[in-house]
Amino acid sequence: MKLYKKEDVPASTREILIKRKCDLCGMESKSSDWNGGTYEVKETEIKITIKQREGSSYPEGGLGTKYEIDLCPECFKKRMVSWLISEGATIKNQNWDW
């Protein structure tokens, strides 16, 4: 036989991503990513988030610093890519399909 008792379990609060906001132009996404609709693709290979981390990692833990920026697809194409090219980067523009 199993005997039960009732006890209160404290409610928890967690943070969930509901939207993104471009750190350059302020445009907000419609959801947690930059997709505009069911068949519309608006993404980058880096999922619009650019980040850099450095520090130390050990089996018992680690620490460091990171820089992170969210860019909408338009700012990524028109501002970030243009700036990288002006700094000497070679960026390939490739078509894709299924």
Image: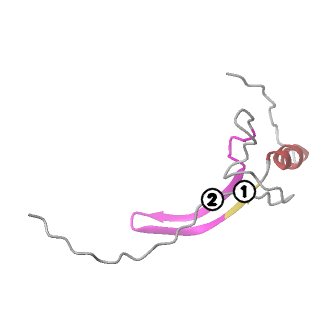
Determine if the magenta segment contains residue 14. no
Mark 2 lies on a secondary structure that is loop
- 23 over 47 or under it: above or below: below
Q: In the rendered structure, find residue 11 and report the number of the disc placed on it.
A: none
Q: Pick out the residue farthest to the top.
A: 98
Q: Kindly identify the residue that appears in the image at 70 percent across and 57 percent down.
A: 19
Which residue matches tag 1?
20
Q: CA distance from mark 1 to mark 2?
A: 8 Å
Q: Which residues are magenta?
A: 42-66
Percent x, y of residue 4: 19, 71
The answer to which quarter of the image holds residue 54 is: bottom right
Determine if the magenta segment contains residue 45. yes
Which residue matches tag 2?
17
Percent x, y of residue 47: 68, 46
Inspect the image, locate mark 2, and give the three-letter code of the amino acid beneath it.
Leu
Q: Is residue 33 left or right of residue 16?
A: right
Pick whichever, 62 or 20, lies toward us.
Answer: 20
- 45 over 12 or under it: above or below: above
Decide whether the magenta segment is chiefly helix, strand or loop. strand
Pick whichever, 9 or 65, lies toward us.
Answer: 9
Percent x, y of residue 30: 74, 51
Percent x, y of residue 5: 22, 75
The C terminus lies in quadrant: top right
Pick whichever, 10 or 71, lies toward us.
Answer: 10
Q: Residues within 10 Å of mark 1 (few under 14, many from 20)?
A: many
Inspect the image, locate mark 1, and give the three-letter code of the amino acid beneath it.
Arg
* Tag 1–tag 2 contact (CB < 8 Å): yes
Pick whichever, 61 or 25, lies toward us.
Answer: 25
User: Colour scheme of this structure image?
Assistant: secondary structure
Mark 1 lies on a secondary structure that is loop
The N terminus lies in quadrant: bottom left
Q: Is residue 47 left or right of residue 55?
A: right
